[in-house]
Image: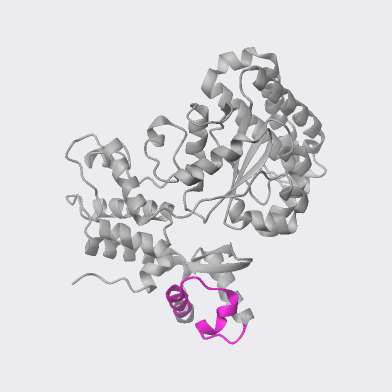
């Protein structure tokens, strides 16, 4: 199975759902977003430090967008100061604390330097070497003690960090970070871009608490340019609930909307052209299936590519001689995959009925409870929270309120897609 893509005539998966990386090969696969790229470039060019925001729905392509913009800046293809990219994204969780965040940020920046200029060269610099040593010693000592204090073998939690040995190293981390930035500038860089993701998966209260906590120790440090990635409405939430944090956000959010259906197909075509190892290679999936995936996911490119990959793998297991998935075959496979995802939940008939009504409704809010044959908002909220936990619906902030929609898998089962006759 590891060579399946070569059997199809590609050096790797042309429907890979993972974000594009900071490489020349992946930069060639990027399509569209010209307006957003200009906005990103303009904001970055004006920053000496602080934070900017990139907003968009989950799975719409925010990480790929930011990665490719970083790559263009790194390679001098953007009209910005020379900035160090980072090759890893910091993923926030409910357990992330300020100390861990700053330590991870410094580690990411040092790793980028080593990746670009070589580990030996970086370790010959006394400032960089001292920072690397501090990170290693902190991880080997304070983290171990903290885990022991928590009563288990690993993990970092806010409740422990307040009194843990890690809290005592923050001044050292900040001093090392400032020294790193000064040395970085002597090396020809104006600063470093640090991406922060997963904000759109966290409870709003958690985000507010965390950003308030790091405002004065991280977001205002010169030379550190933070790119905060979250769902549409992130900046509005910050402005409403964290005025002091919003004051240091540079510019307005760069809004990443779903690619058009035509651009999604162009992205697939680019991947086919760049990844093929034989001239005669063609798309593996009917365009009509891509249209369906686009419609049921509301243009969520990550879902489109993930389900396309799943379909090809499933088809290769059941029908290894087949090299093309038609609309009717693809629709059957999609429904099987969606049914398998639903199976572990053992949903009741009433839950399936509600999901069906939600699927046909499109975007909905708790106050639409009567559309689902419910008598109160509380009844609707109970189903919504359960479906969110099950990953069957998604939510987003829209015009100062929260709205929801069913996922692509629910829509393929209940949304009325029918085979062509």
Q: Residue at x 65, y 35 (%)?
A: 47
Residue 39 rendering spot, x and y as whole percentages: 54, 43
Name the quarter where the N terminus is drawn.
top left
Q: Is residue 359 magenta?
A: yes
Q: Is residue 248 visible?
A: yes
Q: Residue at x 60, y 49 (%)?
A: 253
Q: Residue at x 36, y 51 (%)?
A: 264
Residue 92 rendering spot, x and y as whole percentages: 63, 47
Q: Is residue 219 left or right of residue 366?
A: right
**What is the total number of numbered labels drawn onto the structure image?**
0
Q: Is residue 253 magenta?
A: no
Q: Main secondary structure of the magenta part?
A: helix
Above-or-below relation of 170 to 186: below
Name the quarter where the C terminus is drawn.
bottom left
Above-or-below relation of 378 to 86: below
User: Which of 73 and 159 lies nearest the eye of the viewer?
Assistant: 73
Q: Residue at x 71, y 55 (%)?
A: 239
Q: Is residue 309 visible?
A: no
Q: Quadrant of residue 114?
A: top right
Q: Quadrant of residue 117?
A: top right
The magenta span reads 353-376
**Colour pattern:** one colour
User: Which of 36 and 345 lies nearest the eye of the viewer?
Assistant: 36
Residue 26 rendering spot, x and y as whole percentages: 40, 36
Residue 85 rendering spot, x and y as whole percentages: 56, 31
Above-or-below relation of 258 to 127: below
User: Which of 59 and 148 lies nearest the eye of the viewer?
Assistant: 59
Q: Quadrant of residue 108?
A: top right
């Amino acid at each position: 199975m590891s060579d399946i893509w070569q059997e199809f005539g590609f050096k790797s998966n042309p429907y890979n759902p993972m974000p594009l990386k900071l490489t020349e090969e992946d930069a060639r696969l990027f399509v569209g977003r010209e307006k957003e790229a200009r906005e990103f470039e303009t904001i970055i060019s004006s920053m000496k430090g602080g934070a900017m925001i990139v907003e968009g729905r989950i799975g719409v392509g925010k990480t790929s967008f930011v990665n490719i913009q970083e790559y263009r800046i790194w390679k001098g293809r953007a009209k910005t100061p020379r900035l160090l990219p980072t090759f890893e994204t910091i993923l926030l969780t409910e357990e992330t604390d300020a100390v861990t965040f700053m330590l991870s940020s410094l580690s990411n920046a040092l790793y980028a330097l080593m990746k670009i200029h070589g580990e030996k060269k970086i370790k010959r610099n006394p400032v960089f070497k001292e920072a690397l040593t501090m990170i290693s010693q902190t991880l080997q000592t304070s983290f171990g003690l903290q885990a022991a204090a928590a009563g288990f073998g690993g993990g970092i939690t806010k409740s422990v960090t307040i009194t843990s040995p890690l809290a005592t190293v923050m001044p050292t981390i900040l001093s090392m970070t400032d020294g790193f930035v000064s040395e970085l500038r002597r090396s020809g860089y104006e600063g470093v871009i640090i991406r922060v993701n997963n904000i759109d998966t966290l409870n709003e209260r958690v985000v507010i608490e965390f950003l308030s906590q790091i405002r004065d120790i991280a977001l205002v440090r010169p030379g550190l340019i933070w790119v905060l990635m979250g769902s549409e409405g992130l900046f509005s939430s910050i402005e409403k609930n964290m005025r002091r944090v919003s004051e240091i956000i540079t510019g307005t959010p760069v809004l990443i909307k779903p690619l058009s259906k035509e651009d999604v197909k162009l992205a697939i075509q680019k991947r086919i052209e760049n990844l093929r190892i034989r001239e005669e290679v063609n798309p593996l999936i009917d365009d009509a299936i891509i249209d369906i995936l686009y419609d049921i996911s509301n243009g969520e490119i990550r879902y489109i590519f993930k389900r396309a990959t799943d379909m090809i793998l499933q088809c290769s297991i059941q029908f290894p001689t087949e090299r093309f998935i038609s609309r009717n075959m693809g629709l059957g496979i999609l429904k099987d995959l969606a049914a398998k995802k639903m199976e572990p939940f053992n949903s009741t008939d009433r839950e399936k009925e509600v999901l069906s009504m939600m699927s046909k409704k499109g975007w909905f809010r708790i106050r639409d409870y009567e559309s689902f044959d419910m008598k109160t908002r509380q009844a609707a909220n109970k189903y919504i929270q359960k479906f969110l936990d099950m990953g069957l619906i998604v939510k987003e902030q829209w015009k100062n309120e929260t709205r929801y929609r069913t996922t692509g898998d629910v829509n393929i089962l209940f949304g009325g897609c029918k085979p062509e006759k």
